[in-house]
Image (cartoon, grey):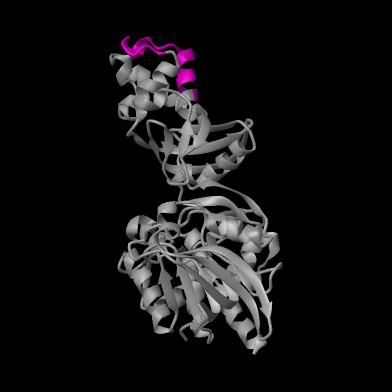
Amino acid sequence: MFPIMTGGNAMSDVIVIGGGASGLAAAIEAARGGCSVTVLEQKERTGKKILATGNGRCNLTNLYMDPYACYRGGNPGFTAQILEQVTVDETLDWFRDLGIPTKDRNGYVYPRSDQAAAVAEALVLEAEHLGVKILCGFRAEAIVPVSRPNFKGFQVTGSRGDAEGLPAKKAGSHFRYEGNSLILAAGSKAAPATGSDGSGYRLAESLGHEIVTPLPALVQLVCRGRVFRQLAGIRTDALVRLLLDGQETARDRGEVQLTDYGISGIPVFQVSRFASRGLHQGRLAEAVLDFLPDLAPEETVNVLFKRRERLAYRPGDTFLSGLLAKKLGCVLLSAAGISLTDPAGWISDKKLEKLAGQLKGFRTEVTGTKSFDSAQICCGGADVSQVDPASMESKLHPGLYLTGELLDVDGICGGYNLQWAWSTGILAGRSAAGRKEEIV
């Protein structure tokens, strides 16, 4: 099943560009369907992004799967069709067949070993066992549809680097590969150190596919104000609401990390794609933090009145100690115009009500996000209206398939983006194998 060399070209039934999660899944399924498969990976090894997922434990998927609630992008119905074809249950069976039993923590699914490296290794071993040719250090630079007597498919040209993963353009010689089918699984622009440098967008665009501007998602938010320098290092439970032009667009609750540049943590990541898109559109983005999400506004006021009565002797800077981190409490007290040195008993009713407002709605302007280097994924990508959800095949070029993060689909935290990679990769690989049967 290894590619046949002909006059400097390597030929195979299926070429896969990208050796990440969706690319390896696609290669395995195509090979299981009887295809010769070549995987072209520009980094020095495959699966680098897999190794970073779940803090090295690899959050494979999630047992709670609602495509309309857990995924965002241009067409939620498109996402749902694919996840109905390759389900979570099928994915779990698929990994068990690879020797990766799983466990779940509150629906979050991990390999039983808690080792992302075991997942990456299992994918590569299965692919190699099936005869898949994996070439690392190869950067695909151009794709050209080819039609000649006895062959119709795609030619991929690029540069081969060395085993140390040096940039291929600078490090090695040029190669050409040809395949009857091509699976473009080159990832997004997020975490470029893992190989997702956005080159897949350019390749898809060169073939006529429209690209929705990729922006950082599942990423930290940069906020206006020097106050964040005082708050750096604080972690606290909070409800995060994201406003665009004053209207709430998204919300999530969990542990928020306050940093010298703004806010981070899973609830921030969950709303970040809306901030990215809104800022790109020139809209005003704001984050509103509720530091007492279990209390209604009137309950918060009552709690503060009781604290003033019981803790009247305390200096102002300790009034919220025990309720919140002291540094955070002092910032909120100052924002409400409350002295940090006067006794708590001196705080007026009006200022307590203002403090309650700060506790329930600390508002800050979001001026940006951290870069693609910090983002886990992107929002945006190849327009899904040009892709057939029944097969992942391009509507523009028969035999071309697009998968994973390359597409304009982004999931929330919790294993959803890896499930998207598995589902689209498996479906594309099977479809490519089915196409070979049709050609034969």
At horizontal 65% and vertical 71% (from top left) the residue drawn is 145
Residue 102 sits in quarter? bottom left
In the displayed structure, 191 sits above or below 404; it is: above
Q: Position of residue 366 (x, y in %)?
A: 52, 32
Instruction: Residue at 64% x, 51% y: name it.
Output: 212
Does the magenta segment cover residue 343?
A: yes
Q: Residue furthest toward the front? A: 7
Q: Is residue 410 magenta?
A: no
Q: Which residues are magenta?
A: 338-357
Predominant SS of the magenta segment: helix
**Quarter of the image where one finds residue 276:** top right
The front one of 408 and 325 is 408
Residue 253 to residue 130: above or below: above
- Observer able to see residue 118: yes
Viewed as shown, does residue 117 lie left or right of 293?
left
Q: Quadrant of the C terminus?
A: bottom right
Q: Observer-nearest residue: 378 or 42?
A: 42
The residue located at (45%, 20%) in the rendering is 355
- Regarding residue 90, the answer to whether it shows in the image is no
